[in-house]
Image: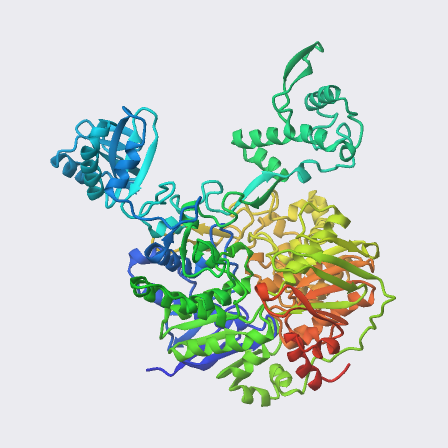
Amino acid sequence: MDVTIRIRGARTHNLKNVSLDLPRHKLVVVTGLSGSGKSSLAFDTLYAEGQRRYVESLSAYARQFLQLMDKPDVDLIEGLSPAISIEQKAAGHNPRSTVGTITEIHDYLRLLYARVGTPYCPDHGLPLQAQSVSQMVDAVLSWPAETRLAVLAPIARGKKGSFEDECASLQAQGYVRLRVDGQMVEIDGMAPLKKTEKHDIDVVIDRLRIKPESKQRLAESFETALQLADGRALALDMDGGREQVFSSRYACPVCSHSLPELEPRLFSFNNPMGACPSCDGIGQVGFFDPKRVVAFPELSLAAGAIRGWDRRNAFTHSLLTSLAAHYEFDIEAPFEDLPEALRDKVLYGSGDEEISFLYLNEKGRSTVKRHTFEGVIPNLERRWRETDSATVREELGKYRNIKTCPDCGGSRLRPEARNVLIGQDPRGGERHGQAIYEVEAMPLSTCLAWFRDLTLAGAKQEIAQRIVREIEARLSFLNNVGLNYLSLDRSADTISGGEAQRIRLASQIGSGLTGVMYVLDEPSIGLHQRDNDRLIGTLQHLRDLGNSVIVVEHDEDMIRMADWVVDMGPGAGEHGGEVVAQGDPETVQRDPNSLTGQYLSGQRAIAIPKRRPVTDDLPWLTLTGASGNNLKNVDLRLPAGRLICVTGVSGSGKSTLVNDTLAVAVSRQLHHAQSEPAPYVAMQGLENFDKIISVDQSPIGRTPRSNPATYTGLFTPIRELFAGVPEARTRGYDPGRFSFNVKGGRCEACQGDGVVKVEMHFLPDMYVPCDVCHGKRYNRETLEIRYRGRNISEVLDLTVEQALEYFESVPAIARKLHTLIDVGLSYIRLGQSATTLSGGEAQRVKLSQELSRRSTGRTLYILDEPTTGLHFRDIELLLQVLNQLVDSGNTVLIIEHNLDVIKTADWLVDMGPEGGDGGGRVVAQGTPEDVAAAPESHTGHYLGKLLRRTPGG
């Protein structure tokens, strides 16, 4: 058995013929500067080859369903295992996906509730009890005498199939009629059912008129129905259509509300049987928001308070003029000054009250018609319902917002599922236990404790035991990777890339695989120092199961706890791609060539700069009463013109406070943004700012056509430069000629992509270089134009560093390139596809774009974990850039976990003390030294240790 993974001659991307041996079944950390080749080695070489070999071993039939990786450029790799990659990709944008569905805990919960849950009546809160045959007979005899009654046995509900065998069997037993999908049919003349569609089928057991003397006949019919339909029966009033479900299992003793047998799909919001009918299991409903409809309440109706209903639209304006005449209000008065009753008439209509409306035809003749006024919002709702046009929906969508579904309260489930309970409810009363949606709303730490304390009576305990054990194991793994603050009902599209990666990591541990090679991409992203120890323990547990764990990481603790460290370098891009040092952490620490080793040994450190004083006479930005998500009426005070960090454990409320409340509220007031901030009471001190720039980690583009040159605006002056070349001017080429997005200069064979898609039936689609332009994106005539010896395609292939040397004499281009280098992106290529950039790289491209703009000295910059993917050296460079911004008078606000950044801040706001319900408060604020001295602050505990061993600047 191989004890090492042998790599010889790896040349993927910027790797320079790398050869090394990695120990198997160990925790290996690959570190180094950004762009030094870490991902090229770990993901594009090791993982790609491990995955490719595994997929190639499968049959041709299986391979067509799997993505085959490109063969990496490497001479030899030996000792590989099947590979699993856990990357920092967001969990997807499917609104039906939750933490519970991703981890499959929701499936175990559905099974648990179906097997041991106690159903309750939604109206009376009493447990549903089994009904005897005599109770069923008595219930039907209470109906009016002589009612034509059918007793039915429901044998299928929402099931696919043709049911040919079942129908033949029923006919053989002497049954003549069925009710199929609500229609009475005779089995003999019944049309074949489509086997791909879902059907409801009831067998007609008996038809009779209700009379007191028919008691015995009814009892026999109900017994037959219960036997045939597994304990269920239906009584149908054939004249009035009234229907009552009976069950020998569950029914309310007061109102006879009954429930079919509990099935796992009743508890699924992705199944019509369990989903809330009002929101279809989404938990939210769209509506036309009056705040968006009345975009400018300070204007009059005539001047355009409601967009599209002003005097420029003759039809709607005449409607409003007639409405104003009827209700005697001034159409020129500001809308916000009108009485509320009149505003409601405009927005929601006149109800049953008819109004005389004056209409003008095409010839200018007027006619008067009396009718009710529909109202602006009902008019928008009708148009939304009736239209099939995507354009119209997009336009109307600007006035819509979302709110929690009023029927299910956001639980996504129908009332029957919401009223099945398990366990003891501390609130007492008639209902005992928790519903499935209440359990899924608990923070994962609370949820785990609830299951550990769960005791059930008798046989239920035995039935539940195995299911609960599986749920507890999965919840433990999620808690161990620092996700204790999340809840199972948390929507996947609100989860960060780092959280999604740790969810996948927990799921992998739950699967219990051995002999696998796991490749992870910075699992510590977004994780507080306190939770990092548990994450490292989890990775060591994965290793101890008998797996090889390879982690691309910059976190100091992770590097020190590794069994083996590979340090890539010595520089980035063209200057990287070599193994500078490798061995156990102590060996790397002693290696004089290793930049990482110098930081580990303390020879180099990120110094603490001279702090800018924070005094009461500074201008302050104040936000009061923030209460979104888990925030508990938070008051935030930020000094203007300073470097500020908002810290705290994962889930403590940092993003809600900064991104969802402060950033949106400031954008609304300074830039009239449409987004709604999370709830807050007031904000003061905005007069000290003239704009806000928020830089997050979302991609800079979702197509290969987007690249750093197009995003930062570099490409425009470059194209203008090429259009100014004498040869180009002679030919009449304008800057558009040098764009690969429009016809003219691009290669039409590949439409400017440089690659052509080839469909392979048993393999994944392949992208091969275009035969015509050979991957250069442009046609021959365009490529003949050269600026200082290079054509446009060759310029796009330059790295930022090479481009700066090339364009040094062009200030408009050089300034933008300088800012890309300042944020540590010297190694990326100008034309590199945006889809290949990591979240951290995308954020730094955005940051460089903002930095290249002229600074006003009154800007509020908000950054969300800008150190993602950065080595110690890169962090030093980034801090220099951020401090330059602050020295120019701007305010920089960072959400950050990295202690090297936190220690250099002028002002800290520490949220906590815990995540989820245990957080949402400001635990400490002040200078880093103040926070380090706060006993309740988890950040302070770790920060204090670092401050004591870091030199001042």
Q: Is residue 259 above or below residue 138?
A: below
Q: Position of residue 294 (x, y in %)?
A: 70, 36
Residue at image location 54% in from the left, 65% down from the top:
485
Look at the picture and state if 197 lies above or below 536.
Answer: above
Colour mode?
A: rainbow
Residue displayed at 43% across by 68% down: 453
Question: Which residue is at the front of the view, 362 or 145?
Answer: 145
Task: Identify the residue at the far right of this view.
Answer: 617
Q: Is residue 255 left or right of residue 169?
A: right
Picture coordinates of residue 475, whole percent (x, y): 44, 67
> Does any portion of residue 714 appear in the rendered image?
no
Q: Position of residue 805 (x, y in %)?
A: 71, 66
User: As drawn, is 262 to the left or to the right of 124?
Assistant: left
Assign the C terminus to one quadrant of the image.
Answer: bottom right
Residue 435 x/y as whole percent: 44, 55
Horizontal side of residue 93 vs 793, given as left or right: left
Query: Who is closer to the viewer here, 320 or 781?
Result: 320
Quadrant location of residue 640? bottom right
